[in-house]
Image: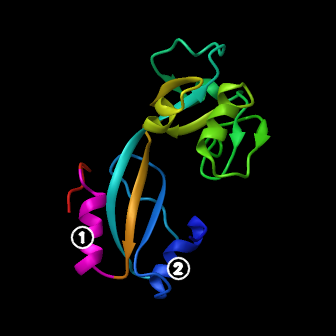
Amino acid sequence: MLPPAEVPAAVATGGCDLGLVDGLAAPSDPLRLPDVAPLTVTGVGEEELAVLIPARHPFAGRSAVRLDDLADARWLDAPGVGALPGVARTAPALRYEGTDLHALCALAAAGHGLALLPRRVAEAAGAGVCVPLEAPRLVHRTELLSPGPPTGAGAALAARLAGGSPYGI
């Protein structure tokens, strides 16, 4: 397991046969990856985003939220989670270094800060309120990286990962 920023270079240099990367993007747009070498990028998933907020939050009853409405909110700062750069006008409320999504969701539900998550994750949190993101129009995207078109076991993995994806392989 590599830090996400190192995956493209590891695939490009042969350190890994395949790599998975994820992040926020406009619908149907590829992720912004470092320019390390020509890579074959296969979209394997795209999911709507939501903000996980405490049940007592003023926006808890909304059917959707705009990030601009939350510019002054307190956000959790965690790997791959949080407000988009330039959106939040306040310092992060809390830095969470862990990788346990249940703990992160519990922190958001308890009012320690908001979390921008894939909608499915926010809905399954079991705590707090999941409010879908209305604007800006962004998605959580997952891509499979390979040094060339996937073949053999790599192609089979790509097909399994993309099952149900709008990208088909």
Which span of residues is magenta-colored?
A: 148-163
Which secondary structure, mark 2? helix
> Is 77 part of what is drawn in magenta?
no
Name the residue furthest left. Answer: 169
Query: Viewer-proximal residue, 161 or 7?
Result: 161
Question: Is residue 143 in view?
Answer: yes
Which secondary structure, mark 1? helix
Q: Is residue 65 left or right of residue 90?
A: left
Name the residue at 41% across, 47% down. Answer: 26
- What secondary structure is the stretch in magenta mostly built from? helix
User: The disc labelled 2 sits on which kind of residue?
Assistant: Ala
Q: Quadrant of residue 30?
A: bottom left
Of badges 1 and 2, nearer the viewer stands 1
Residue 135 against residue 16 in the figure, above or below: above
Q: Quadrant of residue 81?
A: top right
Q: Quadrant of residue 111?
A: top right
Query: Viewer-proximal residue, 51 or 17?
Result: 17
Pinpoint residue 48: horizontal percent, then vertical percent.
40, 38
**Split into 4 quadrants, where in the image is the C terminus?**
bottom left
User: The disc labelled 1 sits on which kind of residue?
Assistant: Ala
**Split into 4 quadrants, where in the image is the N terminus?**
bottom right
Question: Is residue 151 in view?
Answer: no
Q: Which residue is mark 1?
A: 156
> Crowding at label 1, few (<14), some or many (≥20) Cα neighbours within 10 Å?
few
Q: Which mark is residue 9?
A: 2
